[in-house]
């Protein structure tokens, strides 16, 4: 599988060129490289392209720029990117400039935070075993205070003392 | 059909919730009516919600609103080990669970750089084709039911039961099997597995003839489906349609034939296509696909190889139970695999398989640890749902139901 990397600023031209060559976007998804990439290139999208005549695939990484991370939308080049970009926005908070309807697609509209970001807390409390929730999550999307303050909770909701085996 | 809501109220409510630019174009002052269909509606196949604008009986706008079944499965995968994530991805497209497992396992195998033994490949291919049959049988039943042909549902589910019984015999479960794992399959086929498969292969062609007698030339069904929801080839490709929807619009593309994986290179089959692009063409393509699946299963049944059914690398596969009593090494491997799981080399892989609904791709990223760093599934229903609006706009609201059924969206896969 051939792969290449593109900066956000050059993505639209690249997409137009690829489209005229006959490449078809099979998939477009967000990626948070918090632990695996450079700090200034944290967010990006990964585009999987398919060429029907040549029977080839290629992967393109597009790195988002700025804060919030921004990438130009290719939904005009490839209309199918519409839903996929909305999903990447919803899950990672990547803003697609020029998208006709950049709203949340899977999460409720009033949701705060972007769940697939690596710093988005998951709570780690198995709800069915907890009578009273041990961790009060103030607002959805924020890492619970208990995690920040070092209190660890195991899968049964019991607080793990420091020094105990994990 | 659906509850009519005072348009201006609905528009206000939706605007307040931020449905964005699309909704602003709904004008309460004109004669158009805005109605909400779903998410709880018998014809929306799960929890699909459609915001429709109607001019009399004609649909002028259609906005699919999804996410009612979103449970964050991709996030959950990041918390599992590589083996455990199979049990999460299998729950995505719940009518094609084996395809989810297959795509994910193929992607992980590509990262690991391992081969599946021939028997494992054949078992996977055979089960996948049976899954295509069982999934298309649900589509057949619901398409018929939505068109008012209730008996189609009974016929489709009767045969589906035979296939689900076979799954239960092989995997222990009727759905969400967790059977295909990176490296092969979890268990070998049980003794006597040929008999139920042969029964399915022998009875299905006749049963498919029966279905065709029910619907293919039924005047009511033809009236409801031919010329309805037409989608041109260029539109289908632009909107990312794959699978039977694209093939019914004249796009001759099937991953099984064009980019063979597993054992598809060793069987012969045809890829049915049509050029009309309407609901009836999609019906023809799917029924023909069922016949091809039966052909594939029959060939695989005849040449099922002997040998290992999964990769026996001790770093990936727990040792057989009796070896734990004899070998210290086996105990160590077992302990490591059960408590921690195996690690996968750093990298990324995208592998797609041809699911009953089109290209089902799994994109996995590894940071070298024991769980996926990112596990994304490109679900065909999610992408195919974009073709719904162009299909129905300008058509009658009654035809909308036919179009939804012909797109065959599975909301578990759409929302993940």
Image (cartoon, coloured by chain):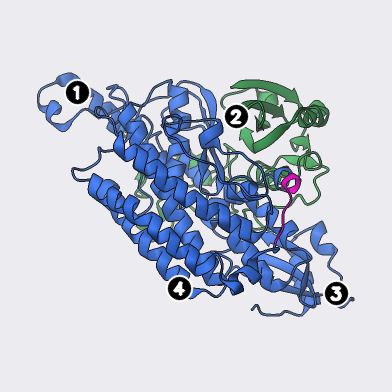
Callout 4: few (<14), some (14-19), or many (20+) C-alpha neighbours within 10 Å? Answer: some
Q: Nearer the viewer, mark 4 or mark 2?
A: 4
The residue located at (62%, 66%) in the rendering is: B402
Q: Nearer the viewer, mark 2 or mark 1?
A: 1
As drawn, A41 above or below B11: above
As drawn, B213 above or below B374: below
x and y, in percent, of residue B411 in the image: 55, 57
Element marked by disc 3: loop
The lab-note entry on whether marks 4 and 3 share a chain reads: yes
Magenta-span inclusion, residue B231: yes
Numbered tag placed on residue A34 in the rendering: 2
Direction from residue B76 to residue B83 in the image, left or right: left
Numbered tag placed on residue B28 in the rendering: 3
Callout 3: few (<14), some (14-19), or many (20+) C-alpha neighbours within 10 Å? Answer: some
Labelled pair 2, 3 in contact (Cβ < 8 Å): no
Q: Nearer the viewer, mark 4 or mark 3?
A: 4
Labelled pair 2, 1 in contact (Cβ < 8 Å): no
x and y, in percent, of residue B61 in the image: 78, 64
x and y, in percent, of residue B176 in the image: 38, 50
Please tell me the colour of chain B. Answer: blue
The CA distance from mark 4 to mark 2 is 54 Å
Element marked by disc 4: helix
Label 3 chain ID = B
The residue located at (44%, 57%) in the rendering is: A133
Numbered tag placed on residue B330 in the rendering: 1
Numbered tag placed on residue B151 in the rendering: 4
């Amino acid at each position: 599988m051939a792969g290449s990397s593109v900066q956000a600023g050059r993505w639209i031209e690249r997409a137009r060129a690829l489209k005229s060559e006959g490449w078809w976007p099979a998939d477009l998804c967000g990626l948070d490289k918090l632990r695996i990439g450079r700090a200034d290139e944290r967010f990006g999208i990964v585009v999987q392209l398919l060429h029907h005549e040549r029977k080839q695939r290629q992967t393109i990484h597009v790195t988002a720029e700025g804060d919030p991370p921004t990438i130009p939308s290719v939904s005009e080049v490839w209309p199918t990117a519409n839903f996929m970009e909305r999903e990447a926005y919803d899950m990672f908070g990547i803003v697609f400039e020029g998208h006709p309807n950049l709203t949340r697609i899977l999460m409720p509209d009033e949701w705060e935070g972007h769940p697939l970001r690596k710093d988005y807390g998951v709570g780690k409390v198995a709800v069915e075993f907890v009578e009273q929730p041990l961790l009060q999550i103030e607002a959805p999307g924020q890492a619970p205070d208990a995690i920040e303050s070092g209190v660890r909770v195991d899968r049964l909701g019991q607080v793990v003392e420091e020094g105990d085996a994990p | 059909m659906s509850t009519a809501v005072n348009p201006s109220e609905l528009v206000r409510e939706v605007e307040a919730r931020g449905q964005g630019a699309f909704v602003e174009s709904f004008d309460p002052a004109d004669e158009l009516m805005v109605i909400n269909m779903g998410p709880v509606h018998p014809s929306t196949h799960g929890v699909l919600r459609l915001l429709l604008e109607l001019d009399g009986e004609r649909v002028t706008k259609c906005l699919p609103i999804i996410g009612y079944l979103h449970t964050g499965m991709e996030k959950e995968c990041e918390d599992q080990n590589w083996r455990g994530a199979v049990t999460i991805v299998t729950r995505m497209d719940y009518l094609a669970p084996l395809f989810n497992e297959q795509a994910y396992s193929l992607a992980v195998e590509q990262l690991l750089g391992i081969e599946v033994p021939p028997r494992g490949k054949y078992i996977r291919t055979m089960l996948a084709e049976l899954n295509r049959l069982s999934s298309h049988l649900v589509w057949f039943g619901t398409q018929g039911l939505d068109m008012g042909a209730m008996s189609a549902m009974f016929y489709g589910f009767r045969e589906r039961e035979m296939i689900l019984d076979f799954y239960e015999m092989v995997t222990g479960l009727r759905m969400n099997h967790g059977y295909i794992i990176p490296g092969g399959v979890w268990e070998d086929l049980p003794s006597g597995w040929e008999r139920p498969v042969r029964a399915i292969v022998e009875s299905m062609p006749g049963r498919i003839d029966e279905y065709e007698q029910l619907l293919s030339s039924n005047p009511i069904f033809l009236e409801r489906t031919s010329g309805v929801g037409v989608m041109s080839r260029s539109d289908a490709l632009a909107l990312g349609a794959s699978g039977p929807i694209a093939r019914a619009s004249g796009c001759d593309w099937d991953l099984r034939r064009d980019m063979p994986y597993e054992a598809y290179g060793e069987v012969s089959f045809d890829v049915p296509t049509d050029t009309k692009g309407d609901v009836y063409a999609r019906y023809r393509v799917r029924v023909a696909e069922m016949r091809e699946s039966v052909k594939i299963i029959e060939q695989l049944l005849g040449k099922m190889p002997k040998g290992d059914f999964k990769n026996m690398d001790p770093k990936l596969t727990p040792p057989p139970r009796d070896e734990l009593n004899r070998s210290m090494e086996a105990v160590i491997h077992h302990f490591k695999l059960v408590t921690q799981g195996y690690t996968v080399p750093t990298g990324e892989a995208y592998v797609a398989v041809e699911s009953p609904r089109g290209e089902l791709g799994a994109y996995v990223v590894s940071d070298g640890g024991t769980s996926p760093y990112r596990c994304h599934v490109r679900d065909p229903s999610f992408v195919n749902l974009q073709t719904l609006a162009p299909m129905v706009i300008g058509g009658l609201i009654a035809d909308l139901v036919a179009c939804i059924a012909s797109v065959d969206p599975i909301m578990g896969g759409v929302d993940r």
